[in-house]
Image (tube, rainbow, N blue to C red):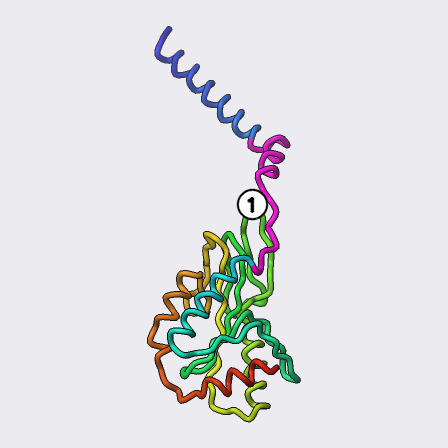
Amino acid sequence: MTPELIIQIAAVVVVIAIFGVAVYLLSPARKTEKAAKAGPIPDDEHENAEAVLRQLRRYAATNEFRVVEPVRIENSKASADLDALLVGWFGVLGVKCLGYGGTIYGQSSDAEWVQEMNGQRRMFANPLKRAEQSARAVRQALFEAKIKNVPVETVVVFTGKKTQLALPRSCGHYTIEQFSTYLKSVHFEEDKKVEVEPVAAALSAK
């Protein structure tokens, strides 16, 4: 067998192999296999939220702060969709937990964000915009209670296991581990002269 013939045979084998792979990738069977691997995205908004609430309770007990939970604030301005409020000398921190797993994509200005999980994608309302609305409701509740000059901040904590956040760092979102680190920052050591008990009472009464 001449070298030229060997090369020709090898070339034919390579072409056949490439054709076979292409047919497999485009075949209905392949599509069915891919579909079988894709699972549903669970409705898990509240999954593992208790872990964050425990963090807040421990932190409040250590620093003589207060945790308001559940949060029931609704007024003419807005309603609060939050899992807890942390009240301290620094002001008020509203916390919204989302148990969405997989990878989360979005920008602070987007109306909707994207969750990718189990080979599926779904859209959900930008939680930062929901958090801004909740902050307005908290400020209005304090205004109606005649309590002024209280800084109000809201954050979103993604509590899903192995959640990946493909989001701008400045958005105000955290994983459970990142939120734990945030609570230890000097931000919460600032004394803004907020009277903890009256503020907590005003927000608990709503």
In the image as oriented, which residue stretches furthest toward the right?
Answer: 76
- Magenta residues (range): 25-46
Q: Residue at coordinates 58% horizontally, 48% vertically from top-left?
A: 120
Amino acid marked by disc 1: Gly
- From the top left corner, tell me how far across and down residue 119 is, in percent: 56, 45
Q: Residue at coordinates 55% horizontally, 87% vertically from top-left?
A: 142
* Picture quadrant where residue 23 is located: top right
SS at mark 1 in the image: loop
Q: Is residue 162 above or below residue 184?
A: above
The residue that mark 1 highlights is 119
Q: Is residue 54 above or below residue 188?
A: above
Crowding at dot 1, Cα within 10 Å, few <14 / some 14-19 / many 20+, comes out as some
Q: Residue at coordinates 49% horizontally, 23% vertically from top-left?
A: 17
Between 186 and 31, the residue placed more toward the observer is 186
- From the top left corner, tell me how far across and down residue 135 is, in percent: 54, 79
Q: Is residue 54 magenta?
A: no
Q: Is residue 16 above or below residue 71?
A: above
Query: Which quadrant would the C terminus be assigned to in this image?
Result: bottom right
